[in-house]
Amino acid sequence: MRREEREITDCSELDAILTRTRICRLAFAVAGEAYIVPLSHGYDPQVHVLFFHTAKDGKKIECIETNPRVCFEVEGTVEVKAAGIDACSWGVHFESVIGHGTLHEIVDPAAKIAALRIMMKQQAGHEADWTFTREAVDSVRVWRLDIDSMTGKRSFAPEIG
């Protein structure tokens, strides 16, 4: 990383960003072409795994079936810092996590529901006794992203407290 003072090295901070964000971008590489897509996600910090759900078919599925290795990115806090009419004095405070891993489909209905519960907790911002009909579970494909590596970057000092 070029700006080492901005690197987030504390795993608990990386986990915190991945846990509080709601959109993750997955980047696929297939036949020399890049394809990136934003997806809602859930993160399990106990096992450092991201979860996603998709439709049964489509471009994402074609990409996964061709090459399940992906790059992912999430943005935590992002705030534009205005500085009047001097354009070069403007800036952005941000934090992000970028990583690599491999997608695996979850096919067991109970495991799918467990992953969907993690996603719902993250998307809703709270725990609940989420219910899923068999039809709803059967209508989606659920994916686990096993993270091989990740790095974080922050352009501001986080508030402590």
Image: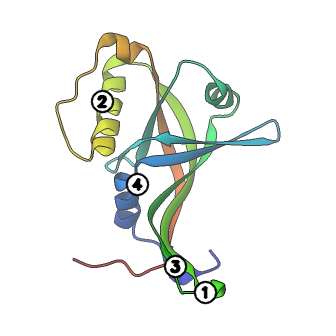
Q: CA distance from mark 2 to mark 3?
A: 35 Å
**Furthest residue to the right?**
32
Quarter holding the C terminus?
Answer: bottom left
Task: Write down the residue under mark 2.
Answer: 114
State if disc 4 and disc 1 touch (CB < 8 Å): no
Q: Please state the horizontal and vertical placement of residue 93, each as a whole percent of the image.
A: 48, 75
What is the secondary structure assignment of the residue under circle 2? Answer: helix
* Residue where numbered disc 4 is placed: 18
> Which quarter of the figure has residue 107?
top left
Q: Nearer the viewer, residue 103 or 33?
A: 33
Marks 3, 1: nearer the viewer? 1
| First along the sequence among labels 2 and 3 | 3
Give the structural element (helix, strand or loop) at label 4.
helix
Above or below residue 107? Residue 7 is: below
**Image label count:** 4
Query: How far apart are the alpha carbons under marks 3 and 4?
Result: 17 Å
Distance Cα–Cα, label 3 vs label 1: 27 Å
Going by the numbered disc 1, the residue's amino acid type is: Ile
* Residue 6: assigned label: 3
Residue 158: x percent and y percent? 36, 77
> How has the structure been colored for display?
rainbow
Rendering coords of residue 76 (x, y %) = 43, 62
Residue that carries the numbered disc 1 in the rendered image: 85
